[in-house]
Amino acid sequence: MIAKIIVTQNDIDNGKRYSRQDCPIALGISRLFLVAPEYVSVRAFQFSITNWPYYHRVFLLPPKAVEFIEAFDNGDHVEPFEFEVTPREGVFELKQFSKHKTKGS
């Protein structure tokens, strides 16, 4: 699965510096994957989408996204941009492998 993340000017204007869930990239990810920001976590070199215990995917960020995070967090001027990502190997949808019922199911 290849995903194209689009970071808009609106994401930049509404994004929060040093925030894993409310930075401009997280807002673009939330919009693309149709998930609430609390399920997204953007770190220096990767991001994850998690709805534990049912779903967990980790994606590596390309260099231009890493540079964007650093510039944005430093308060530098940044422009809208887009980038493509694929899930990291070995990361899976947990529900596919669960043989045990979870609490409440």
Image (spheres, rainbow, N blue to C red):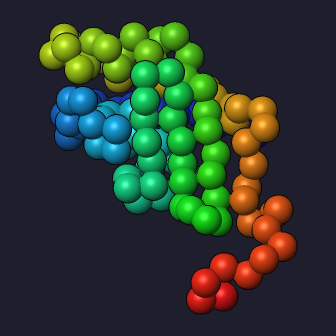
Residue, x 53% and y 28% (percent of image)? 46
Q: In the current view of this chain or complex, which residue is farthest to the bottom?
A: 104
- The location of residue 36, given as percent across then percent down, is 41, 59
Residue, x 73% and y 42% (percent of image)? 91
* Count of marks placed on residues: 0
50 or 27: nearer the viewer: 50
The quadrant of the rendering that contains the N terminus is: top right
Residue, x 60% and y 26% (percent of image)? 60
Residue 18 appears anywhere in the view: yes
Query: Residue 90's quadrant in the figure?
Result: top right
Q: In the current view of this chain or complex, which residue is farthest to the left?
A: 75
- The location of residue 32, given as percent across then percent down, is 51, 47
- The location of residue 21, given as percent across then percent down, is 34, 44
Residue, x 78% and y 77% (percent of image)? 100
72 sits to left or right of 95: left
15 or 59: nearer the viewer: 59
105 sits to left or right of 48: right
Residue 28 appears anywhere in the view: no
15 sits to left or right of 46: left
Is residue 52 placed above or below 79 in the rendered structure?
below
The quadrant of the rendering that contains the C terminus is: bottom right
- The location of residue 43, given as percent across then percent down, is 43, 29
